[in-house]
Image (cartoon, rainbow, N blue to C red):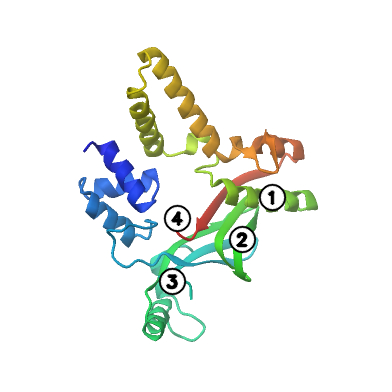
Amino acid sequence: MSDIEKVKHLRKSTGAGFKDCNSALKESNGDIDKAAEILRVKGIAKASKKMSREAKEGVIVISGDNKKTSLIEVNCETECSSDKEKLIKSEMINGKTVEDNLVELIAKIGEKITIGKARTLNNSNSQNFIYQHSVIRDNVSKLGVIVSLETSENNETITKFGKQLSMHIAATNPLALNSEEIQNEIIEIENELIEEELKNSGKPLEIAKKISLGKIKKFKEENSLMTQDWVMEPKKKVKDILSEINIPSLKIKEFTRLKIGE
């Protein structure tokens, strides 16, 4: 089985993304089963029949304010600052660490519970805006987004844009802010997938190359926030909306998105 076939197989069996599957395969020296286990341990894999019990349900918790905001993924088997190692050792309001409280809760309800991904946005001269989808209670949901807008102003236009942009990110799940920021590994794997698809198309080599370049360009545009179609007005791009707002100091600094099961 070729490397690209292994990536495709692992993506199908775990639901993980290109980059994560490729990294796991490198770490396991090409062993698919070991790669799947690596993804499971890291909390990346969605689901796999070959995997042992896995905490694939849970919630996304949002904490902080509009200057420093964190997303924390709490996983369980069934519904019932971003340094994870520091987080689990930190003390909670009852005087016990997060880790100790998790152990007690697991013993009480008999289910595996883990802290999954944790991300924090904290930028100077910026305002953070959040969006939650499938809300369970205040600051607890199935999907959470934080977007950081750099600006020297604070008005209703910026607030409206920040809220709408966080909703857009929730819906479209961009890989990066701009196309040049999409990781090379992801582009290489996508390129290999496209080339493999075109191998059996029967098209002449030159035409196949042009098609491949076109597909890669489209992939970058569709997965870069600035060039995505604006969900509220699909005939325009996100960069067009930003331009129309016409506030020179307004810039999209960064964003993060967490969803249970992804």
Residue indicated by mark 3: 78
At which x and y percent is residue 85? 38, 67
In front here: 255 or 172?
A: 172
Which amino acid type is marked by label 2?
A: Gln
Which residue does the image show at 40% across and 74% down from the upper left?
A: 89
Residue 72 visible in the shown view: yes
Which residue does the image show at 38% across and 50% down from the upper left?
A: 16
- Vertical position of residue 72 compared to residue 104: above or below: above
Secondary structure state at the residue bearing disc 2: strand
Query: Distance between the Cα atoms at labels 1 and 4?
Result: 22 Å
In front here: 149 or 15?
A: 15
Query: Distance between the Cα atoms at labels 4 and 2?
Result: 15 Å
Q: Which of marks 4 and 3 precedes in the sequence? A: 3
Considering every residue shown, the one lying at the far right of the view is 156
Query: Distance between the Cα atoms at labels 3 and 4?
Result: 16 Å
Q: Which of marks 1 and 2 precedes in the sequence? A: 2
Which residue does the image show at 32% across and 56% down from the upper left?
A: 39
Which amino acid type is marked by label 3?
A: Thr
Query: Distance between the Cα atoms at labels 2 and 3?
Result: 20 Å
Q: Which of marks 3 and 1 precedes in the sequence? A: 3
Q: As drawn, is 57 to the left or to the right of 5?
A: right
Residue indicated by mark 1: 164
Which amino acid type is marked by label 1?
A: Gln
Residue indicated by mark 4: 262
Label 3: how many residues lie within 10 Å, few (<14), some (14-19) or many (20+)? Answer: few
Residue indicated by mark 2: 132
